[in-house]
Amino acid sequence: MKSLYRPLLALFASLAFVSGAFAQDNGTRDEAKAMNEAAIAHLKKVGNDKAFDDFTKDKANWNKKDLYVILMDTDGAVKSHGANDKLVGKNLLNLKDQNGKEFVKEFMAVANKGEGWVDYDWAHPVSKKVEGKATFVKRVAGTNLVMAVGVYR
């Protein structure tokens, strides 16, 4: 019995370590909101063209854990996308999640009020599994731009 105890203990310890590592790979709501604010500050500092490029290509600074920046105009056209550069230039206003929720339209409705959270379901960029997601959206003051950073729930 003792010979079975140690390997099982080691297995459970390694599983606990692995699950803890996965939990650390998920951003928090506070981190998403902070990244959103930092992205707006960066946009104001460097201007649209440089910021659009940075948010899409500069993974070291604008992709943390599973968080990334999405920047759209109020018509739903993607200006930058940290997880999928093929979406840049596409209009996603009518995009729906797997449950039929038009979450981009909700992004715009929330942004028109200033800022807030939108819940929907979306594929996780790492696991590729559909999960619940909450995205913090904020209208960039004085522009027609909407900054979005989401966290998987």
Image: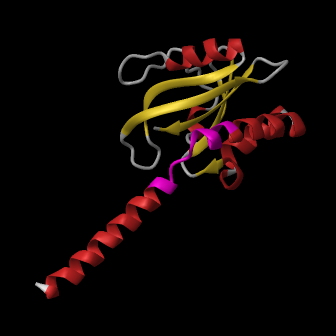
Answer whether residue 27 is visible to the viewer in this image: yes
Position of residue 147 measured from the top left corner of the image (x, y, whole percent): 69, 29
Task: Note whether 17 is above or below 125 in the view shown.
Answer: below
Position of residue 135 measured from the top left corner of the image (x, y, whole percent): 57, 30
Residue 11 location, quadrant: bottom left
Residue 50 location, quadrant: top right
The colour scheme used here is secondary structure
Q: Nearer the viewer, residue 91 or 153?
A: 153
* Residue at the (66%, 14%) spot, across then down: 75
Residue 114 location, quadrant: top right
Task: Note whether 17 is above or below 42 in the view shown.
Answer: below
Q: Determine if the magenta segment contains residue 25.
A: yes
Q: Determine if the magenta segment contains residue 60.
A: no
* Residue furthest out toward the bottom: 3
Q: Main secondary structure of the magenta part?
A: helix
Q: Which residues are magenta?
A: 23-33
* Residue at the (78%, 39%) spot, across then down: 51
Task: Note whether 78 is above or below 101 in the view shown.
Answer: below
* Residue at the (42%, 33%) spot, across then down: 132
* The C terminus - image quarter: top left
* Residue furthest out toward the right: 45
Left or right: where does residue 52 sit relative to residue 151?
right
* Residue furthest out toward the front: 2
* The N terminus - image quarter: bottom left
Q: Nearer the viewer, residue 12 or 60?
A: 12
Task: Note whether 24 is above or below 55 in the view shown.
Answer: below
Position of residue 87 measured from the top left corner of the image (x, y, whole percent): 57, 32
Left or right: where does residue 38 sit relative to residue 92?
right
Left or right: where does residue 76 sit relative to residue 55?
left
Answer whether residue 82 is visible to the viewer in this image: no
Position of residue 137 measured from the top left corner of the image (x, y, whole percent): 65, 26
